[in-house]
Amino acid sequence: MTQTYEDFSKYGKEFADTGLKSFASLSKGAQAIATEAGEYTKKSFEAGSAAFEKLFSAKSLDKAIEIQSEYAKQSYEAFVAEATKIGDLYAELAKEAYKPFESMVAKAK
């Protein structure tokens, strides 16, 4: 009976330690994602402001349409690149958060 309690206590401690490691990975990954999103927002705002200034300085309607089209193209490309990057960060976050539990799952089999 004592051995069973000791085993249970050992597994409980191991599970808690694993949970804390996983939580640390989640925190670190979430921070990386938030930083990346903040940087993208800043870059996007700066690009929008620059395009707006160019748009106001356009001398003709054709030039204004050209500026707007170029801005839309660049914005779309930047968004797709950023969405891919953040998707990769989320995938890495999931892998890192699960990694501490891999050994426990292997032991359970």
Image (tube, rainbow, N blue to C red):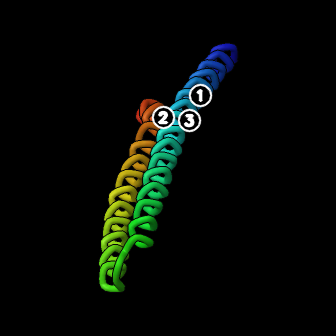
Judging from the image, what secondary structure is the residue with disc 2 in? helix
Question: Taking 34 as reference, is 73 above or below it?
Answer: below
Q: Residue 20 carries which label?
A: 1
First along the sequence among labels 2 and 1: 1
Q: Name the residue under label 2.
A: 101
Tell which of 33 and 17 is nearer to you: 33
Gap in Å between the C-alphas at discs 2 and 1? 11 Å
Q: Residue farthest to the bottom?
A: 61
Q: Position of residue 81 (x, y in %)?
A: 33, 58
- Residue at 43% in and 35% down: 99
Q: Where is residue 15 in the image (x, y as percent from the top left)?
A: 58, 28
Q: Residue 27 carries which label?
A: 3
Q: Position of residue 87 (x, y in %)?
A: 40, 54
Question: Where, by quadrant of the figure, is residue 75 drawn?
Answer: bottom left
Gap in Å between the C-alphas at discs 2 and 3? 16 Å
First along the sequence among labels 2 and 3: 3
- Residue at 55% in and 30% down: 24
Q: Position of residue 43 (x, y in %)?
A: 43, 52
For discs 3 and 1, the disc positioned in front in the rendered view: 3
Tell which of 14 and 79 is nearer to you: 79
Which quadrant, please, contains the N terminus? Answer: top right
Judging from the image, what secondary structure is the residue with disc 1 in? helix
- Residue at 45% in and 63% down: 48
Circle 2 residues within 10 Å: few <14, some 14–19, many ≥20: some
Which quadrant, please, contains the C terminus? Answer: top left
